[in-house]
């Protein structure tokens, strides 16, 4: 999870000479270094939930039924290996995955499960909602924060869209009131109808209940760069369900992303 603090004056990011939208493998990803600085913002690149000296974890969610998964770039950057847990609610089995496409600027990555034990999952029940959402709209977040102490059961936080711009007026992000913790990075942000509207990426270091999510329109731009553009769901099957019923459906499509 990225932590932002307007009171400090140092920022680090993953830097490299590859353009946004580059298709890459894990070996290339691992060659990036951290060496840039900016004014008036501090970003903690410990991306997620540190489990031990070699493993950290974030959250991801299914884009297609054949193993394409969305997460944050900073969750998988520098990974020697990527594993996905929680497919169909099974946390005892992990599946090997590979980063195939990323947008460093907007902190997005698409990974592909490449494991002979993986079959397809059920059809995706939610739709991507690229149109801008409104301030005051009810939202909820699903993810796997602080797994070492909170366990592997999926966690829900909810709130509203507080602003249509993010940190320091960033137009690519929403500010939301739903609390997030290390491990939420890369998790989905849904509206009250269960439509996907963003991807969790950061929280403010000082302010209470100030979190940020990349707008899903930037994910749509990245999807359009895939070698084979997937056919995405155009109709939600969960819009009429209550929140508890939506979560029961969605928890099969939100995963733990571990990197070593």
Image (spheres, grey):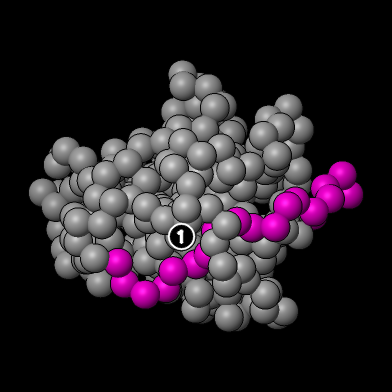
Relative to 203, say whether 70 is above or below.
below
**Magenta region includes residue 186:** no
The secondary structure type at the circle numbered 1 is strand
* Residue drawn at 37 percent across, 66 percent down: 215
The residue tagged 1 is 196
Relative side of 223 to 129, left or right: right
Q: Residue 40 lies in what quarter of the image?
A: bottom left
Relative side of 259 to 166, left or right: right
* Along the line of sight, the residue nearer the viewer: 10 or 60: 60
Image x and y of residue 57, in percent: 54, 38
Relative side of 68 to 200, left or right: right
Relative to 9, say whether 203 is above or below.
above
* Residue drawn at 53 percent across, 53 percent down: 238
The residue furthest left is 7
Image x and y of residue 98, in percent: 70, 57
Residue 257 visible in the shown view? no
For the N terminus, the image quarter is top left
For the C terminus, the image quarter is top right
Image x and y of residue 257, in percent: 59, 43
Q: Which span of residues is magenta-colored?
A: 114-133
**Magenta region includes residue 120:** yes
* Along the line of sight, the residue nearer the viewer: 220 or 97: 220
* Residue drawn at 14 percent across, 42 percent down: 207
- Counting other residues with Cα less than 10 Å from the Cα at mark 1, is it few (<14), some (14-19), or many (20 or more)? many
Residue 240 visible in the shown view? yes
The residue furthest front is 240
* Residue drawn at 37 percent across, 52 percent down: 192
Relative to 65, say whether 56 is above or below.
above
Q: What secondary structure is the magenta-colored segment mainly?
A: loop
The residue furthest right is 116
Image x and y of residue 2, in percent: 35, 48
Relative to 255, say whether 78 is above or below.
below
């Amino acid at each position: 999870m990225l932590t932002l603090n307007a009171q400090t004056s140092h920022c680090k990011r993953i830097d490299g000479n590859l353009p946004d939208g580059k298709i890459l493998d894990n070996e290339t990803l691992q060659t990036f270094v951290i060496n840039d600085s900016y004014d008036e913002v501090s970003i903690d690149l410990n991306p997620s939930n540190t489990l031990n000296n070699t493993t950290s974890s974030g959250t991801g969610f299914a884009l297609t039924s054949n193993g394409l998964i969305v997460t944050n770039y900073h969750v998988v950057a520098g990974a020697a290996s990527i594993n996905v847990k929680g497919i169909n609610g099974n946390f005892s089995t992990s599946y090997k995955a590979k980063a195939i496409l990323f947008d460093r600027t907007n902190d997005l990555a698409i990974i592909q499960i490449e494991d002979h034990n993986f079959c397809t999952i059920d059809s995706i029940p939610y739709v991507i909602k690229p149109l801008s959402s409104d301030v005051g709209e009810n939202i909820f977040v699903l993810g796997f924060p602080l797994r070492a102490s909170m366990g592997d059961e999926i966690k829900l936080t909810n709130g509203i869209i507080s602003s249509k711009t993010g940190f320091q007026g960033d137009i690519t992000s929403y500010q939301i009131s739903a609390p997030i913790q290390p491990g939420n990075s890369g998790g989905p942000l849904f509206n009250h109808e269960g439509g996907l509207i963003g991807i969790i990426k950061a929280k403010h270091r000082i302010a209470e209940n100030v979190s940020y999510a990349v707008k899903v329109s930037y994910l749509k731009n990245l999807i359009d760069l895939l070698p084979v553009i997937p056919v995405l769901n155009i109709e939600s099957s969960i819009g009429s369900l209550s929140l508890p019923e939506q979560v029961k459906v969605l928890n099969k499509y939100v995963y733990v992303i571990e990197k070593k």
